[in-house]
Image (spheres, rainbow, N blue to C red):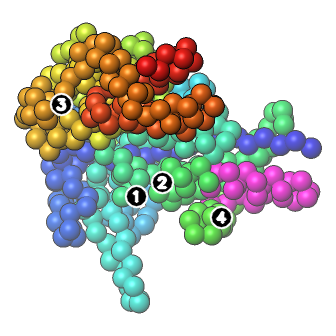
Amino acid sequence: MKYEAVIGLEIHAELNTESKMFCSSKNDPFHSEPNKNICPVCMGLPGTLPVMNRKALDWVIMSGLAMNCQINKFSKWDRKNYYYPDLPKGYQISQYDLPLAYKGFLEVGGKKIGITRIHLEEDTGKLIHPKGEDYSLVDFNRSGVPLMELVTEPDITTGLQAANFAQELQLILRTLGISKTNMEKGEMRVEVNISVREMGAQSFGTKVEIKNLNSFMAVEKSVDFEIHRQTEILQKGGKIVQETRGWNEDKRLTFSQRAKETAMDYRYFPEPDLPPVEISQEWLSQIKSIIPELPAERRTRYKNMGVPANYAEVLTSIGISGDYFDKVVRICKALNARSVANWIVQEEVNFQIKPEFFGDLMQLIDDKKINVTIGREVLKRLNSSPEKSPIKIVEEMDIRTLNGANELIEIIDRILKTNSQAVNDCKKGKDMAIGYLVGQVMKETRGQADSIKTREIIVSKIASGRDD
Ligand SMILES: [Zn+2]
């Protein structure tokens, strides 16, 4: 029997607004002093009233648009009722049936993954369990921090796809500048819903939830482990237990945390203290107008410029290198984008170097005024003195420039004449000897000659017997 996995993700991301979701307390959940950024509103004291953070609304609408979602013209807030020591109000303000965004998709690795919804809610406080003590502490600095929740359709089938989706989402949220999304800090939290069923079956298998995954690697490995575990149970005729599982990084396996026999009833009802959110066409247009270039658009633009896909990927995912690349090719239009990308991705480049200076260096190499070896040396010097012109650096390096092919041929002739033993070895087919001769020419020209061209000339001269 063949089995297939059905996987959906629930991802939370803390938005990095100045203030919290419903009050003016500072949004700084990692403040070293516990319970520093709190007020009666985020502590849920009686008689207080929440006020919406407009920026957080803007940002979730923006991320919805960035991920091809429909935006609800009429959205509202709901209370999700439950008690936990990190939730002083006894309920969380969230969105139940009318989320800000719905029905979108993200293309990851050539596959379209549906997005069911994106909504806004508030984060809870944090419990701290001091080691060896018989009590717990609560820090409410995180209470009321704006939290975006995204739910995908069960379109994912492998651990790699799940990790890639989360990574692309992180890149989008960072590009929009709305969340820091560090997984190890809990600024972005990925939960996986996963079940396995017979290939082609219509109904879903029993669902298992994996929580507390704090890296993309953990997402990928835990999903793959879980697919394997569930498939094995089903093959042996066993039954999957509906439960929440954690991921043990050291042992590389998932483990049971708690069984989930019945769904929690949160008794959702509309939040009476907040008006619904009506999103006008003007509001939407205004947000649309400030969406920056998205990662997928950037990759495509780079590919259209002739940048190889793997370099386009690096320049996109490390935004600072992409921004630098863009500046260099904008200023130096004559340059070959592919080789500029090559240098920025492959070499260590100090982005303090003026883009026009970096462009000058590329131009020196393009014009064959210096070769790649010398270019690297110039870059090294530029890295430590980014305010210095590479043209000046080359002058100071006092390297003889090879004025065209004639000079190179003269040097090669001289080298061949003074190394007759190596030339004879070459004639006998010893490749090592050619390498030796090329090395001599490079030495003579202080690394200035083009080694490939030099090799070609030597081979052709020896083959034609003209070693004089
Ligand atoms: Zn507050």
* Residue at which label 3 appears: 399
**On the image, which quarter does residue 67 sit in?**
top left
Residue 242 sits inside the magenta stretch: yes
Residues packed near mark 2 inside 10 Å, few (<14), some (14 to 19) or many (20 plus): some
Please report the residue visible at 31 percent of the width from the left and 72 percent of the height from the top: 138
Q: Element at badge 4?
A: strand
x and y, in percent, of residue 295 in the image? 39, 27
**Is residue 434 visible to us here?**
no
Please report the residue visible at 79 percent of the width from the left and 37 percent of the height from the top: 203
Q: Which residues are magenta?
A: 222-244
Residues packed near mark 1 inside 10 Å, few (<14), some (14 to 19) or many (20 plus): few
Residue 184 is labelled as 1
Instruction: Work out how far the residue at label 3 is from the one at label 1, CA to CA, in angstroms.
Output: 50 Å
Quadrant (top left/top right/bottom left/bottom right) for the N terminus: top right
Q: Earlier in the sequence, mark 1 or mark 2?
A: 1
**Is residue 364 visible to us here?**
yes
Q: Nearer the viewer, residue 139 or 411?
A: 411
Q: Nearer the viewer, residue 146 or 215?
A: 215
Could you tell me the amino acid type at mark 2?
Ser
Residue 215 is labelled as 2
